[in-house]
Image (cartoon, rainbow, N blue to C red):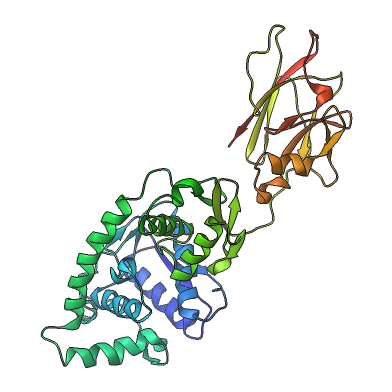
Amino acid sequence: MSAVHVNHGWEASTDLERAARAVARHLGLSLEVVAVTPEPGPSPEGAARVARLEALVAVSRAGLIVTGHHADDAAETVVGNLLRGAGATGLSGIIQERRPFVRPLLDLRRSDIRRLAEKLELPFVDDPTNADTSIRRNLIRHRIIPELDKHIEGELVEVVGRSARHLAEEDAYLDDAVPPGMVSTDGEAIRLAVAPLVTVSAVLAKRSIRSALRVVHPPYPGTSQEIDAVLAVTMGTAPRRDLGGGFIAEREGPHVAIYRPAEPLIPDARELPVPGRVRFGEHLIRATHADSGRLTRISHDWCRLALPQGSITIRAVAAGDRIDIGTGSKKASDALGEAGIPLRKRSAWPVIESRGRIAWIAGVRVAAWARVESPLTNWVELERQAE
């Protein structure tokens, strides 16, 4: 078990980091400090929250993330979400457990935790920004909830918490009603299948999108604006839409992909031994000497080539590459597009080359000159597997 503190680089961050180190020492825990730079935007607190949670997920190494959220936090979240017009998910507030996040203190009040910390002589510090009522959450905490407390029977935090728990049960039921196979991942992007998305009810379609967005930036299921943007791409009214946090939604054939654009890492060209195998980015290319006989397998990810003597090279597709199609040639970029290869993957896509000519765009197309059409002695079988 270890502790993590996220430093946002704000005015009070140094004092908060110092307090985190003191708590970790007192409890005998190692502390990892992660510095983040929240994305600029209209809600600095919201951007900081997203950056903080992304950092925690990144350093958790697939383990549990235990946070100190309490009942007052949950009530403030519900009231804040109500004021921005949230649905059932937002009005469910903070969930006690949604892996990898676990919040064991969620049933305790802030005042109870403070008294317990004082009794146990745990070091702590108050974040001075929490007193700034120009921030909506602080306004809710210091003015709205105390004022409502004066006019209702019982304490507002407990009443709101009870309603949130009821909504959370119904929200979980809707999550379970999402048809299987709607959301998938290819390592770089979260993908939504368009066909089922446009045939289910609007409620389940939005629920599916929320499930995808929760994977994109856990544990948040996205804003209404993000959901509307993904729906626009799904329905074909826009090929691509920007989402919050630097993410985009883009149509990729039968899917809508949600991802954060990044420059792809293009592997260096390498010789492909026969027999042998080469890992090329997310692809694994296997090469073997082919046996004579009939061609029995037909697959874009497997081929038998009649290659001339000489070395075989595997490299990334390059601008201007063309492949022989028998009646002329075709741009490699066009062949990749026709095969439905996402634009974000094309610049690092592998091609097999011999003596300066493309023999195979891996998993996409075999050059006419390299096809096996008659008995030969120099056959090579190639297979592509996605890692």
Q: Which image quarter: residue 92?
A: bottom left
Taking the view exactly as shown, the residue that stands out farthest to the left is 153
Q: Is 147 left or right of 254, judged from the image as shown?
A: left
- The image quarter containing residue 28 is bottom left
Q: Residue at x 86, y 45 (%)?
A: 320
Please identify the quadrant where the N terminus is shown.
bottom left
Report which quarter residue 363 is drawn in: top right
Please tell me whether residue 229 is drawn above or below residue 130 in the rendered image. above
> Residue 281, position in %: x, y?
66, 41
Asked if residue 32 lies left or right of residue 278, the reply is left
Query: Does residue 260 show up?
Result: yes
Check the picture and name the quadrant holding the C terminus: top right
Q: Position of residue 332 (x, y in %)?
A: 79, 40
Residue at point 24%, 66% (across, down): 167
Residue drawn at x 37%, y 46% as measured from the top left: 179
Q: Nearer the viewer, residue 24 or 6?
A: 6
- The picture places residue 383, in percent across and down from the top left corner, at 66, 26
Asked if residue 57 lies left or right of residue 352, the reply is: left
Work out whether residue 238 or residue 324 is closer to the camera in this orientation and state it: 238
The image shows residue 28, relative to residue 367, as above or below, that is below
Q: Residue 70's x, y, as percent?
A: 26, 73
Side of 2 relative to 383 (left or right): left
210 in relation to 314, above or below? below
Q: Residue at x 38, y 43 (%)?
A: 180
Q: Say above or below: 343 vs 371.
A: below
Residue 119 visible somewhere in the drawing:
no
Report the number of numbered marks: 0
